[in-house]
Amino acid sequence: MKPEPRWITDWGLTPPDLKQWVLLIWFCGVLGGCASIELPDSAEQSSIEFNCAVGDVTPHEAIVWLKTTEAQTLNIQYTTDPLWSAFQETVRVSTIPETDFTAHIPLTDLTPKTRYWYRNLVAGEGHGRPCQFITAPLEDDVTTVTFVIGGDTRHSFQPFSIMETMRTVSPDFFVFLGDTIYADKETPARDLSDYWNKYRENRDRFAERLFAETSVYAVWDDHEVDSDFTSTNPLIPIGRQAFFTYWPIRQHTPDSTRLYRTFRWGKAVELFLLDTRQYRNPENNTMLGEAQKQWLLAQLVASSARFKMIISSVPFSDPRVDKWGEYPEERDEILGFLTKKGITGVLFFAGDVHLGAVSRMPGMTDRKEYIFGPLAATMNYKISRGEPRFEYFNNASPNFGKITVHPDGLKPSVHIEWFDANKTLLHQVILEDHRDNSLISQ
Ligand SMILES: [Fe+2]
């Protein structure tokens, strides 16, 4: 049921609130972009196991996620006013054991390109500490968009301190490229509670702090289910169920198992989040499955975004098995379609292979792919930096991408930067759209 927001006018600040908001105002300034909130390391509320995260943000909607320790009734309060002089709240929802006491609570009727603060209110308790995010701008909005991107967070590589570095660049959102857990590693997950546990153990304090200050678009790769899984793997239903349970994802209607989706961020950006796993079938030579492939091609044709960003967990440019190299016909069909239809401003972003890279597409030296990660996992020593496809290659340090998109001016541009956990700039590429249908790498 769609929660109906209602307005509340109420100062009602307790001393802890006041302390928190003095800090907030100090860091943010009224209605300005907020660089950082000082958060305690653990939730003050005994009923909350994980405080809020938010995802699948659009200009008018967002999905808030949280987890309680046991069955609770709660709602979400939210506002555009950092002083909380007035706010709205959703209807109450209940957390239940069947979803491991998690909740997905939609916020609706939001204002585009606006910073929101939100917090939980558990029945019978005080409210939780506030989190924040920005709504997407409308399609015709000429605004700069900045986001961070990366994948691969393995529990044994905690703490996920690189997420703290990602937080400090104040991104509009985070694109999580998959391998958000490693279900098949250490103690392999075999039943639903095993999978849930993998997600719980991966929410370290750095992940919590990042998710408290920006929104996330999460896609999965193989390790959310099983290593290199394909569409016939019997663990898919419970791995998928756990993925939906633990990430703030809007379930598609009528197909609640669908993970591929698009998000628009103003004039500049459209994200095309692919599901490279649950439909892949080597016998039928398909990575995406027919329905998703046709959806992708149609969406690309229809998009008016200046930059169309295809988010594929596994790289298009990688010639190996399990990557797009195992599905060359489908890969070449998609790449050829872009050329044939004259679709401009298409960028490819990928993870999975545990190295940062700029990699040329097969046979197409002017089309490249930008690869990020791992955030926190072993580096890849199996691929040679000497492969001619690599223009940039880093298998020495965990890394994330910072993408800054400038849609305005005579030369709209995309600035792609690779940073390590110490915020050292490892590499950068500037792509300029000269409006002659080309993207030029500098
Ligand atoms: Fe991985």
Image: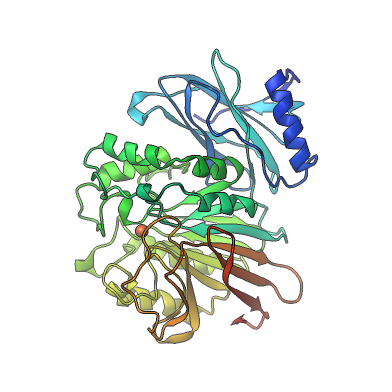
Q: Is residue 241 above or below residue 270?
A: above
Quarter placement of the C terminus: bottom right
Left or right, 135 with reference to 238: right
Q: Is residue 170 above or below residue 360?
A: above
Q: Quadrant of ligand 1?
A: bottom left
Q: Is residue 414 visible?
A: yes
Left or right, 29 with reference to 386: right
Q: Nearer the viewer, residue 420 or 298?
A: 420
Q: Nearer the viewer, residue 225 or 343?
A: 225
Q: Please provide percent x and percent y for residue 389.
A: 41, 83
Left or right, 282 with reference to 307: left
Q: Please provide percent x and percent y for residue 170.
A: 65, 52
The residue shown at (47%, 49%) is 160
The residue shown at (75%, 76%) is 410
Q: Is residue 81 visible?
A: no
Q: Please provide percent x and percent y for residue 363.
A: 40, 87
* Quadrant in the rendering for residue 334: bottom left
